Image (spheres, rainbow, N blue to C red):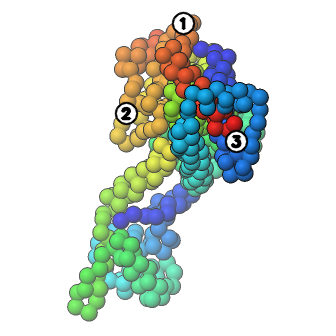
Amino acid sequence: MEKRQSTSILIVSLLISGTIFVQMVLYVIAFFAGWDMKFNLVDVCHSALKAIGMSSLEYALDTLVIYTLLFSLWKLGSQLIHTMNMTRKFRQYRENKLTIELNEQYNTKKESILVISYPVPIAITMGFISPKIMISTGLMNLLNDDELDAVIYHEMYHKKNYDPLKLFLLSLCASSMSYIPILKWFNQKYRIIQEVLADNLAIEKQATSMHIGSALLKMLKAGKLDSMPFVYASFADTSVNYRIEYMLNPLKDSQIKIPVNIAFKSFMIFSLICIFFIYALA
Amino acid sequence: MRIRKFKMHESGLNRFFGPLEAKIMDILWNNDEMTIKEVQHILEKEKAMSFNTVMTVMNRLVEKGILQKRTEGRSSMYKPIQSRIVFLDTQSKEMTNELMDEFGNVVVSHMLDALEDVDDELVAKLEMKILELKKDR
């Protein structure tokens, strides 16, 4: 798996959803402002669609626009509120001495690593503009120094790559435009590729897969205990199996192939939506 | 009974209670059932404390559902509803759940995602590989 794959997935996903989103916003503006949009292409398509009698489609289009825009707003608001709540809680749980020590050890800028006093092993990167790595004391107790290094290198890849923001955008597109199935597939695959690439950074830095593999195993075992509830919903697919396969055989070519059926369905739906918009805006 | 605000920067009972509340709870857990006067007497060994202050705090703990109060003759007897061990265990679980509840709602990059789909055969293979790597070192 390569960085090129994840970049392509991100760009295509944002292009598809961006195109639809811009059209929807234009549609709402045109509706409320009485804006008469006249383009040559629009004129051509409008005339063609009117000729085949598709005037009743406007209601379906309105429903789609209202659903997508409101759902996106709701998701965005909900994400902001939950992120603020979590950040506030993390501040309460902050372990000052270890936070300073770890940031000095990794020579980070602007205190990129935050240690929280918490019994459950946690290693996450969160924040859109300036992502931070959160490490719990539970994780520090579970792992040895080399394994902890590996986990921090893994999270540093996510931080450097602004993955929380990118993952949120992909997740927002996939859920608010669930009628385009390829977006859900892109969301899942992007996550898998990024996890493998983050592991790869840890392997490169330590010149062995032993520590990141061992850390993963320990966290998996801890997560299976009832007292360590690692239940993260929202993602149906899991990247763990891909990551283990990569650790077992890093040289194996594991290119992700686009599912033709889903891609074709998505293309048809995308084209239809574009046509409806051109028709409605004309 | 649910503690609404955990003070993670504090240690011991102070994570769940105010300073005086923590002292009173400590006394009651060590002595079982006591009157306000008896609690005040123990507290005063450390620092002068008015009866009304102790009464207010103890009645607040009753309202919170942490202490129970019963009348015996002309005096009221107070005792903790839960033992110290049960209380600390319940609150630790609450603290864990409080933060974990937020995870499902926030998009973050985390080290592990859905565990239920993990392939046990792959995990066994990885364990073997790690053992081999450790032997080679």
Chain at numbered mark 3: A
Q: Tell me, for residue A224, which label it has, or none.
A: 2
- Percent of width and height locating residue A109: 76, 39
Q: Which of A233/A170 is in front? A: A170
Task: Please give the name of the residue rendered at 47% of the width and 43% of the height, measured from the top-left corner.
Answer: B104
* Both marks 1 and 2 on one chain: yes
Q: Are marks 3 and 1 in contact (CB under 8 Å)?
A: no
Q: Which of A142/A116 is in front? A: A116
In three-dimensional space, the C-alpha distance between marks 1 and 2, rounded to whole angstroms, equals: 29 Å
- Residue B43: image quadrant is bottom left
State the quadrant of the C terminus of chain A.
top right
Mark 3: which amino acid?
Leu
Task: Please give the name of the residue rendered at 54% of the width and 15% of the height, measured from the top-left corner.
Answer: A258
Q: Are marks 1 and 2 in contact (CB under 8 Å)?
A: no
Closer to the eye: label 1 or 2: 1
Task: Please give the name of the residue rendered at 74% of the width and 46% of the height, measured from the top-left corner.
Answer: A35
Q: Is residue A34 above or below residue A242?
A: below
* Both marks 3 and 2 on one chain: yes
**CA neighbours of label 1 inside 10 A, class few (<14), some (14 to 19), many (20+):** few
Q: Are marks 3 and 2 in contact (CB under 8 Å)?
A: no
The residue tagged 1 is: A252
Chain at numbered mark 2: A
- Percent of width and height locating residue B109: 57, 35
Residue B8 appears in the rendering: yes
Q: Is residue B44 above or below residue A116?
A: below
Horizontally, is A278 left or right of B93 in the view?
Answer: right
- Percent of width and height locating residue B12: 47, 60
